[in-house]
Amino acid sequence: MAELAALEDPKTREVNERHGDDHGVNLGKLRALAKRLKTQQDLACRLWETGDTAARLLAILICRPKAFERDELDVMVREARIPKVHDWLVNYVVKKNPHAEELRPTWSADPDPVVASAGWALTAERVAKKPAGLDLAGLLDVIEAEMKDAQDRLQWAMNHCLAQIGIEHAEHRARAIDIGERLEVLKDYPTSPGCTSPFAPVWITEMVRRQHDKT
């Protein structure tokens, strides 16, 4: 904790806090520290329990993702209110854990939008990698009905799922693009030069174009 405190930089904190992340540690330095520590599950659990954002990010980098039980992950996702912690926890830990698929539908239906966003993030991953058994038309029904008024993090995850359906499944592409165009979610999101817009119709069209260019 002392070492993390020594890495705290006021300017970094100022930038991070604009995104809702209450820490001032440069992520490159945090990753270097994690590389030195290597995997240490017990230390990771103790760092997580501090509740400190930088400590929790470090915990995610040095933990053993498959070591967590289902209920532990459920508690952690509900505790992870800071955007970066939530994002890393879902992407670096939950997606690599054998309980991910069991938790996915439970979280997706949770009344807490931040927890639900974790479920939708897992669904977007499955749409791309293991779509067998998913009701893609049913997912599009829910997105069409609920995405426009969803809380920011949940809306982002649902939009990602919408884009993945359009990108990966040609039979649903026209409907996915149509839903995106009508709902206009993230249509005006500021996008850096060279980056693809998260607006689903643009995102889908660009990724499909790239796939065709490769073949």
Image (cartoon, rainbow, N blue to C red):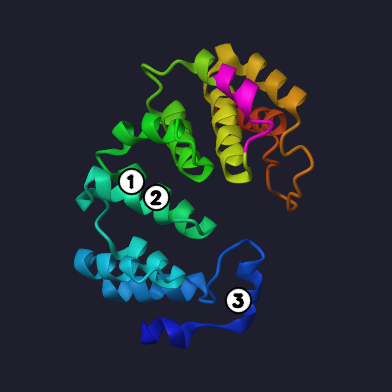
User: In the displayed structure, does residue 189 sit left or right of residue 63?
Assistant: right
User: In the displayed structure, does residue 25 sit left or right of residue 70?
Assistant: right
Residue beneath the point at 41% across and 18% down: 134
Provide residue 81's location: percent of width, then percent of height. 49, 56
Location of mark 2 (residue): 77
> Within the image, what quadrant is residue 41 found in?
bottom left
User: In the displayed structure, does residue 96 sit left or right of residue 208?
Assistant: left
Location of mark 1 (residue): 74
Q: Is 190 or 1 nearer to us in this picture? A: 1
Q: Is residue 168 above or below residue 9?
A: above
Disc 2 from disc 3: Cα separation = 25 Å
Name which residue type carries label 1: Asp
Residue beneath the point at 72% across and 32% down: 202
Magenta stretch prevailing secondary structure: helix
User: In the displayed structure, does residue 107 sit left or right of residue 206?
Assistant: left
> Within the image, what quadrant is residue 38 found in?
bottom left
- Which image quadrant: the C terminus? top right
Query: For the magenta stretch, what is the residue range?
Result: 140-150
Name which residue type carries label 2: Val
Disc 1 from disc 3: Cα separation = 30 Å
Q: Is residue 60 above or below residue 170?
A: below
Q: Is residue 163 magenta?
A: no
Residue beneath the point at 53% across and 19% down: 169
> Is the C-beta separation of discs 2 and 3 under 8 Å?
no
Q: Secondary structure at mark 1?
A: helix
Location of mark 3 (residue): 12
